[in-house]
Amino acid sequence: MALIVQKYGGTSVGTPERIKNVARRVLETQREGHQVVAVVSAMSGVTDGLIKLAREISTDPSEAEMDVLLATGEQQTIALTAMAINALGGKGASVTGAQAGIQTDGVHTKARIANISPQHVHDLLDSGHVVIVAGFQGQTSGGRITTLGRGGSDLTAIARAAALKADLCQIFTDVDGVYTCDPRVVPDARRIPVISYEEMLEMASSGSKVMQSRSVEFAKKFGVKFEVRNSMNANPGTLVTEEDMSMESVVIRGVSIERDQAKITIRGVPDQPGNASQIFMALAAAHLNIDMIVQNVGLDGKANISFTLHKNDLAKATSTLNPVLAALPGVLLSADDGIAKLSAVGIGMRSHSGVAAHMFEALGRAGINIQMITTSEIKISVTVDQDVIAEAARVVHKSFKLNESFITT
Ligand code: ASP
Ligand code: MG
């Protein structure tokens, strides 16, 4: 007998029919002889609807009250799922985050899990229940309701699996797993059978968002292996795990893209200590999220700095920077809001040479101009004109033969 934690996301519980589907699936797993904990999200659109509702009441609602409100989304789903299980003749028990022993810090709307007391859930499992846990929510030591940030049901499931020492953690979603690239952009993209935590994190931070990044970080830290699978079929999914030697033989695991990026270039920055800090401190104080940063080697005592950010933040960034730059004589700012980022990710990059050259050559041959380049140990990112991002993705995907099946040597 194994203990299995399954998580069902918003689309997987998006309609009454789908909730019944979840009930059937968890009961099937239980009938195979396992103990099952199902972590569920709010039905799709419910959390967004609640946020909208709050905004109609107040432009600046307290974050503590937002948590009380948002936690109701998951609370609906646990009750409905338990009812569906009971209607099928099973024994379902719904528990809120607090009842499930999930204790967090007091940072409302993005709380961190401090501790999980697993006893109550163990007791319910031992008495033959399928336990339905509300995702995304917890409680402070003082008894206030908290939430774990958007997409936080993933974190509930991973942390739950760690606390219960589960044998298996399955994240059910509306796709078959993690793909080598977005199949809407690259039609011959393939499901990745196994991916390392680090690759998964790099893919997520560069646009392929299957899961909340915090939950993958948590899984990595506590060594929770998990599968990403489709709740609407029985297809195999993607196993996310610690890397091993065989995984290095695949040079590039996947390609991710991020549209709607903007680039700001600041020319003629005096090449002296403190200038980059002034610029980025101002951006940080305005809570602007900066992605790639490139500075060239100073020439004639001047340097150029470029960075990228989301297109929606461009206006705020320029208005934040204008007064800062006014104090630096001869400095020029230019902006471009029509760019996109493409990243090739793979731990195999560490042990193979010429990977960047190969990628740039493929883009060059296709006549695609590369604007900025940044790399990490397992990722090469470039920005290109937004209009050519889909073609760039197809070209790079093909050049690394990601459309062919994975061969591990
Ligand atoms: N319902 C929450 C959200 O929409 C949490 C989740 O779905 O994981 O962000
Ligand atoms: Mg979700």
Image: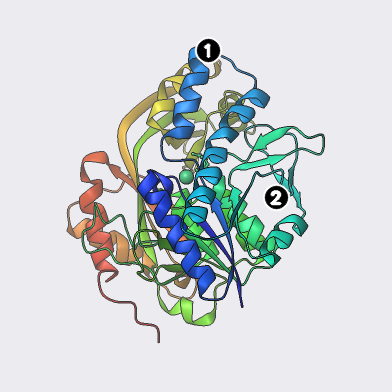
Which image quarter: residue 276?
A: top right
Nearer the observer, 308 or 187: 187
Residue 56 x %, y % = 48, 14
Nearer the observer, 227 or 49: 49
Crowd class of label 1 (few under 14; some 14 to 19; many from 20; radius 10 Å): few
User: Which quadrant is home to the N terminus?
Assistant: bottom right
- The span from disc 1 to disc 2 (Cα, nearest Å) is 31 Å
Q: Which residue is drawn at 50% across and 60% down?
A: 89
Q: Does any atom of ligand 1 lie closer than 8 Å to the CB of label 2?
A: no
Residue 286 x %, y % = 57, 23
Tell me the colour scheme of the image. rainbow
Residue 114 x %, y % = 76, 47
Which image quarter: residue 243?
A: bottom right
- Secondary structure under the numbered disc 1 in the rendered image: helix
Check disc 2 and give the amino acid type: Ala
Tag of residue 100 = 2
Residues at circles 1 and 2 in contact by the CB criterion of under 8 Å: no
- Secondary structure under the numbered disc 2 in the rendered image: loop
Determine whether, in the image, residue 153 is placed left or right of residue 360: right
Tag of residue 57 = 1
- Label 1 or label 2, whichever comes before in sequence order: 1
Nearer the observer, 203 or 65: 65
